[in-house]
Image: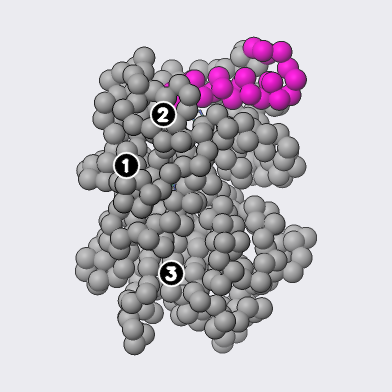
Amino acid sequence: MLLRQCLGNSGHIAILSLHNQSRYQISDNNMNNYKRNILITGGAGFIGSHVVRLFVRKYPEYHIINLDKLTYAGNLANLSDIEQAPNYSFVKADIADLDDMRHIIRDNNIDGIIHLAAESHVDRSIRDPFTFARTNVMGTLALLQAAREYWESLPEKFEGKLFYHISTDEVYGALELTAPQGIESPFSTKASSEHHHAYGEEFFVESTPYNPHSPYSASKASSDHFVRAYHDTYGMPTLVTNCSNNYGPYQFPEKLIPLFINNIRHRKPLPVYGKGENVRDWLFVEDHARAIDLIFHKGKVADTYNIGGFNEWKNIDIIKVLIRTVDRLLGNPEGYSDSLITYVTDRAGHDLRYAIDSRKLQKELGWEPSLQFEEGIERTVKWYLDNQPWVDRITSGDYQKYYEEMYANR
Ligand code: NAD
Ligand code: DAU
């Protein structure tokens, strides 16, 4: 398989060759020179690309291997600034292919896995649940099994190894909206917005029972259970974290924030599901990546940490912030794009409120977000407006078909 084909004009990059007997060996990097060989799955996606960038830059002594199938959501252009780093390699592979996972993990002497590869969009899961079960459940299982087989075959077995699984707050289900007007949030972090509201008294904590509602969250919940089962049954060192909604550069424009920025720019309708009353808890993606770094190195094996910034927003309010920010940055008069707001049929099974309590992570590992929401959203809107070619490239072709299917006659 010619992986270079996927890279366009990206130039030289260390790629794992997939040709012959020694397939999956590093082509350019000598893995023995590195202190650790870390496999990051889904590294060409939104959050994964920020994690890969952080690790490649911060840990030149680690070899970082980005494994990604390059689905519609995977884009190597997200990593063009680090792809030539000597400690970075890329391999195109499907996590659900057990045999490939065995080869990649064994041949590259992988000692740590940060697993982000997944189908991640709730609306797509409603239309095509099987793809979500295949990748999120069977894919995670294949990765677990391949890691277990390799690590158990080593003299030191699981010592110094870690399988870190990235999950979501959606597995906990939905919280009530008991305070629709907003009350002062009982807790805050640097990420909390100026308005600093909570829309209910309850928060998701690490012991909240799982209660997923969408095929996406059901598949993520199932994968979380498999990860914990591999610890409890085989003694494999695993860790799970559950994070709230991320926003920031490189997010595929099917998700609320990048989709709406792009639509405002192009004066297209803004499809607000239901009444726009649903609440999400937003965290800047780089702060999630910093939390992953901290937890990968300092987290307690077999434990779970919630990640979030105590930053709840009703969809309609965040949409108004986006409109104001895009209009201001484009030099439009205030209120210019308000008329684009279009209420459409609600998402099936739409969870009402997510709100993460991340105090355990703050208390035990000292994690604190670095960016307040107002600054993060300004940076994000600017990034999308300044990177229109990135948006244009991925919103051509298949994306148009998806958009038609998802939003026409809604
Ligand atoms: P994304 O859709 O942007 O990226 C997913 C990546 O996984 C893509 O690069 C894709 O090509 C790759 N991938 C998909 N199927 C694969 C397969 N079978 N084999 C190998 N690679 C495959 O997703 P994201 O928003 O960056 O989310 C990353 C992870 O974080 C997911 O596990 C998601 O559940 C979790 N998460 C996301 C958020 C969020 O707000 N986006 C919040 C909490 C947790
Ligand atoms: O909470 C973490 C989760 O956040 C992650 O696990 C998921 O991978 C990620 O996609 C995200 O899920 P959401 O469903 O919350 O994100 P999305 O951007 O799709 O939607 C955010 C809110 O905006 C949600 O209430 C639905 C609403 N929405 C979304 C779209 C795409 C609209 O009103 N209109 C839209 O067109």
For residue 315, side relative to residue 170 (left or right): right
Confirm whether residue 353 shows in the render.
Answer: yes
Q: Quadrant of residue 215?
A: top left
- At label 3, which amino acid type do we have? Gly
Q: Which color scheme is applied?
A: one colour
Q: Is mark 1 within 8 Å of ligand 1?
A: no
User: Tag 2 or tag 1, which sits nearer the N-term?
Assistant: 2
Magenta stretch secondary structure, dominant? helix
Can I make out residue 45 in this image? no
For the point 32% across and 42% down, the residue is: 359
Dot 3 or dot 2: first in sequence order is 3
Q: Is residue 374 above or below residue 24?
A: above
Q: Is residue 390 left or right of residue 165?
A: right
* Cα separation between marks 1 and 2: 15 Å
What is the spatial separation of the Cα atoms under label 3 and label 1, in whole angstroms? Answer: 26 Å
Q: Earlier in the sequence, mark 3 or mark 1?
A: 3
Can you tell which mark lies on residue 359? 1
Query: Which kind of residue does numbered mark 2 sit on?
Result: Glu
In the rendering, at what x and y percent does residue 367 appear? 41, 48
CB contact under 8 Å: marks 3 and 2: no
| Residue under the point 31% across and 28% down | 186
Decide: is 301 above or below 245. Answer: below
Q: Where does residue 60 sit, x and y in percent of width and height?
A: 59, 69
Identify the image quadrant of residue 148: bottom left
Q: CA distance from mark 3 to mark 2?
A: 33 Å
Residues in magenta, as a range: 313-336
Mark 2 falls on what kind of element?
strand
Disc marking residue 312: 2
* Tag 3 residue: 112
Of the two numbered discs 3 and 1 in the rendering, the one whose residue sits closer to the viewer? 1
Q: Quadrant of residue 403?
A: top right
Nearest the eye: 211 or 377? 377
